[in-house]
Amino acid sequence: MKVRDVKREALTGPRRLRHGVFMAFLLILASVSLLLHMARTGRQEKMQAAKTRYAALDRAYPIDRVKAQRSRFYQRLYYLGHPSKISYAAADLVRRLCGTVDEPLQVLDLNVIPGWQKLDFELTLAAAAGTESAARAVFMDFYRSMANRLDISPVAFSGPMKPARTPGRVAAGFVFTVSGQMELEW
C-alpha cells in the first residue's frame, strides 16, 4: 500500500463518521419538524372547534340583546313610568268621580292612596236633603252608579253623619264617606 492509499483510508473513516452524524442530525430535525407540524395541526383543529362554538354564541347574541331590551322596557314601564302612571290614573279617577256627582251631592274631599296595581280612594260627599232618609236615597243612587258605570269597586261607605264644619266651608246636608279601589291599567 502506498502512503496515499493509507491517507485515503484514514480520511474516509472520519468522513463517514461525519456523514453519519450529519444524517442523524437531519433525521432529528425532520422528526422535530414533523412533531411541530402535528402540534400545529392539532391547535388549528382546536381553533376551528372554538370558532364553531363562538359562531353559535354569536347566533345567540340577538336573543340576549332582545332579552336585555325587554328587561329595560319593563323597568321603564313599571319602575320609571310608575309615578306618571299613578298621576294619570289619579287624575282620571278624580275626573270620573267628580263628573258623576249631581246637584244634590257635593264633593267635600277626595284622598287618593296609590298602590302598585290599584288606587285606593276615600271620597267624602255631602248630600243636600231635608231628612236623613232622603239624603240616604240620593247617596245610594250615586253609590250604585259609581259601581256600575265607572268601573270602580266601592269597598265600603259610612254615613249619613251630621254636617261637619270643614275649614272655610260648611257642608250643606248629610255627610257620607265612600272607600273604594280602582285598578291601574298598564
Image: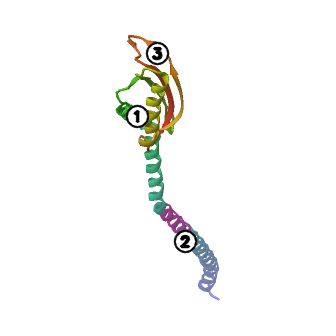
Query: Is residue 34 or residue 16 the one in the foreground?
Result: 34
Q: Earlier in the sequence, mark 3 or mark 2?
A: 2
Kind of residue at disc 3? Pro
Quadrant of the snapshot with the C terminus: top left
Residue 77, given in percent of the width and then of the height, sits at: 43, 42
Is residue 60 among the parts visible in the rendering?
yes
The mark closer to the camera, 3 or 2, is: 3
Q: Which residue is mark 3?
A: 163
Majority secondary structure in the magenta region: helix
**Mark 3 and mark 1: span between their CA atoms?**
25 Å
**Mark 1 and mark 2: span between their CA atoms?**
74 Å
Query: Is residue 119 or residue 4 the one in the foreground?
Result: 119
Q: Earlier in the sequence, mark 1 or mark 2?
A: 2
Left or right? Give the position of 28 relative to 136.
Answer: right
Q: Secondary structure at mark 2?
A: helix
Part of the protein shown in magenta: 44-57
Which residue is most to the bottom? 1
The mark closer to the camera, 3 or 1, is: 3
Quarter of the image holding residue 33? Answer: bottom right
What residue sits 63% from the left and 78% below the top?
A: 20
For disc 3, the neighbor class at 10 Å (few under 14, some 14 to 19, many from 20) is some
Q: Which residue is mark 2?
A: 41
Q: Are marks 1 and 2 in contact (CB under 8 Å)?
A: no
For disc 1, the neighbor class at 10 Å (few under 14, some 14 to 19, many from 20) is many
Is residue 123 among the parts visible in the rendering?
no
Q: Which residue is mark 1?
A: 93
What residue sits 34% from the left and 27% below the top?
A: 103
Count of labels in the image: 3
